[in-house]
Amino acid sequence: MSNLLRLRTAYALQELPLPECFAKLEGSFSSESFGLRDLESEGLNVLRRLGEVDLFAWHIEQATVPRSPEVACSLVSAYLAAYFGSCKALFDAVALFLNSVHQLNLPLKRQDLRLGEFWTILRSQSLEAHDRYVQFKSLCLEVVRWRDAAVHRAAPLAILHLSTENRDQWRPERGTIKVVDDPDWRGGELGSATAWMDPLDKHRSWKPAFLNLCELVCDDWIRTR
């Protein structure tokens, strides 16, 4: 095991397993062939960003144990805002990677998977690459919706939910932290009709697609390295 990739990312943390596609790729590197070019590569940038996604998800998981509910709820809210930002950063890293591999020559602010211009130019350069990656555009737009709300408007609202008995006897350890299932919750009315979700629901929903996306990146990285 070379550890050439994981030690340069958040996967250096023992609690975070390196995704299989990158573990296989790591096995193809050797210390003799791994150099500055690889450290600066857009492929490694994608792995770093995926590592940050998993790192913040891990922090959210740790924080949801409500030993101190006030602190736990605040931490979950803060980590979620960072999590959504890291998800958008992952998509941006993939855009940078594709711009480099296919020589799209787009300016930095136009290297963005949510922009139609990006897909038009990628299609003109490589129809094959366009058709493999375009399936992730809708997920990118969903991530941006949550990121924009969490970063630019209001952090996710996390509240400790307790049964009546546990609330009356104040047993926070028996409660569950929930988050409003609406990125634009601010300005609305919270009540019996409010939808709530587990703080990691989005991660559980999005992570399989993130891994599929990164499998494509790994294939292209080793092919073009």
Image (spheres, rainbow, N blue to C red):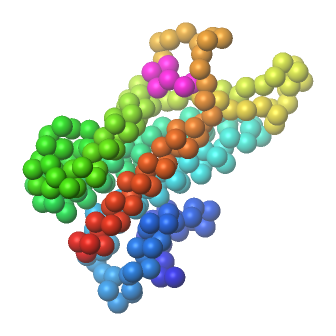
Taking the image as shown, residue 74 lies to the left or right of residue 37, namely right
Which residue is painted at 66% across and 44% down in the image?
Answer: 63
Toward the viewer: 201 or 159? 201
Coordinates of residue 117 in the picture (x, y in percent):
14, 40
Residue 30 in magenta stretch: no
Q: Which quarter of the figure is the C terminus placed in? A: bottom left
Taking the image as shown, residue 2 lies to the left or right of residue 45, namely right
Which residue is painted at 66% across and 26% down in the image?
Answer: 159
Count of labels in the image? 0
Q: What stretch is highlighted in magenta?
A: 180-185
Coordinates of residue 69 in the picture (x, y in percent):
72, 33
Q: Is residue 176 shown above or below 106? A: above
Magenta stretch secondary structure, dominant? loop
Q: Is residue 16 visible?
A: yes
Q: Is residue 31 shown above or below 113? A: below
Residue 181 in magenta stretch: yes
Coordinates of residue 116 in the picture (x, y in percent):
18, 37
Q: In which quarter of the image is residue 9?
A: bottom left
Which residue is painted at 23% across and 72% down in the image?
Answer: 224
Coordinates of residue 132 in the picture (x, y in percent):
28, 52
Taking the image as shown, residue 175 lies to the left or right of residue 98, namely right
Q: Can residue 107 be seen in this view?
A: no
Taking the image as shown, residue 104 lies to the left or right of residue 6, namely left
Q: Quadrant of residue 125?
A: bottom left
Which residue is painted at 30% across and 73% down in the image?
Answer: 222
